[in-house]
Amino acid sequence: MAKPSVCIERSESYNYKEVREGVNRLIEGLGGLSMYFQPGEKIFLKMNLLIKKRPEEGVTTHPIFVQAVGDALKEFGCHVIIGDSPGGPFTKGLLKAIYKTCGVEKIAEESGFTLNYNTEGVTKKVNNGKVLQEITVMKALEEVEHVISLSKLKTHGMMKYTGAVKNMYGIIPGLIKAEYHFKMPAIETFSDMLVDVCSFKEPTLSFMDGIVGMEGEGPSSGDLRKVGAMIASSNPYALDFIACQLVGIDPLEVPTIQRSIERNFLSGNHEDIHIVGSSMESFSLKPFITPAITDVNFFKGRVPEFLVGPMSRFLLPRPVFDHEICVSCGDCGKVCPAQVISFKKTKGYTKGKPYADLTGCIRCFCCQELCPVKAVRIKRSKIGARLFKL
Ligand code: SF4
Ligand code: SF4
């Protein structure tokens, strides 16, 4: 296996000049754009635009980071198209609102990037997939020569960490993502699927915005942490491995990294990755606080069948809705892959409030990810946490 390179550079802020200089160093560290692209090619910058949030909320890839990468590509002579399929329905109206709020509309105007509004999907055969035989992806990807993953360094309630590989899940249009969640609720199968998606449309390069990351209840309800790092690689699996180590997450505990090692996309040894640019030691960070993850099928085969339901219901981490904060927008009900969220008239409120039927809940935590006002928390039982360490 050839030794992949991962380049790390510092940026203390989202000041354009500082970020752009850092991005230039990242590109040089990876051998220059001419190693990967030809002038005149169309390149799709696949951001993480999970939900309509302002850049400073740290949920989405920061627009200044995207602008710096896009400007470098434009100067090289490439055409830049920016897009994502955020959580929820994939519609032009929603895209427009997200581009505006996330600061992408502004950088596209300033730098002359094209924003993707093609919401069609196309179904393709997957060769060498572990769990996917076919996949539905954004049709817009058919019109470009390359995809670049522009992820954000964050923790994740179901997958512990989300980075370059998981970012590619957003090439699946809109609510079709919920179908994939529902069909593959177990963490192992779901992470195999994420690796299938990434290897189906492997980004030519991956860049990670780790200038400000998110720890705790990521990917949308956690706490912001200044890391000051920008990371890039032509190998998204190696990038994730190093990004985890940088913020004190054991990469071998991250399901997508485990799966990529099983599939020989990565050796799993730090020594087998060539680090370029700033040394990891120079960041000297306190480790990120990470969510404890537990498979939805944890109790199957461990306890008598009649106890699986009740124990799963009360001891697995579960979504809890804070009705005081909830604005009754209905989004969690729309995105719930298992369709177990119902809205009921609740004393003291004029609008219906969400309740989840935990018997059918697959613990994907999409409701928490996509709630616009952080009204969904993941409740973890202390007894459950002790059991999961068995
Ligand atoms: S209630 Fe939340 S965690 Fe449970 S299946 Fe629905 S979206 Fe996933
Ligand atoms: S919990 Fe969040 S997503 Fe669900 S209805 Fe309330 S505000 Fe909307």
Image (tube, grey):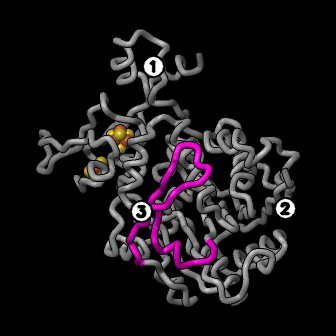
Answer yes or no: is residue 34 visible. yes
Observer able to see residue 250: no
Write the residue at 42% across / 50% down: 369
Where does residue 17 sit, x and y in percent of width and height?
A: 70, 81
User: Is the Cβ of the residue at disc 3 closer than 8 Å to that at disc 2?
Assistant: no
Q: Is residue 137 magenta?
A: yes
Residue 376 pos. (x, y %): 36, 44
In the rendered structure, which amino acid carries the disc numbered 3? Pro
Which badge, 3 or 2, comes first in the chain's sequence? 3
Count neighbours of disc 3 (C-alpha within 10 A) and say few if under 14, some if 14 to 19, many if 20 or more.
Answer: many
Disc 2 target residue: 278
Quarter of the picture holding the C terminus: top right
Provide residue 102's location: percent of width, then percent of height: 46, 71
Q: Tell me: 204 left or right of 118.
A: right
Q: CA distance from mark 3 to mark 1?
A: 32 Å
Residue density around tag 1, few if under 14, some if 14–19, many if 20 or more, within 10 Å: few
Labels 3 and 1: the sequence-earlier one: 3
Magenta-tinted stretch: 117-146
* Image depth: mark 3 or mark 2 in front: 3
**Marks 1, 2: nearer the viewer:** 1
Q: Which residue is mark 3?
A: 173
Front one among 277 and 15: 277
Decide: is 49 above or below 165: below
Q: Please, what secondary structure does the residue beneath circle 3 have? A: loop
Marker disc for residue 311? none
| Amino acid type, callout 2 | Ser
Tell me if 321 is positioned left or right of 292 in this view. Answer: left
Task: Name the residue carrying label 1.
Answer: 300
Q: Earlier in the sequence, mark 1 or mark 2?
A: 2
Does mark 3 have its CB less than 8 Å from ligand 1?
no
- Residue drawn 50% across the image and 63% down it: 171
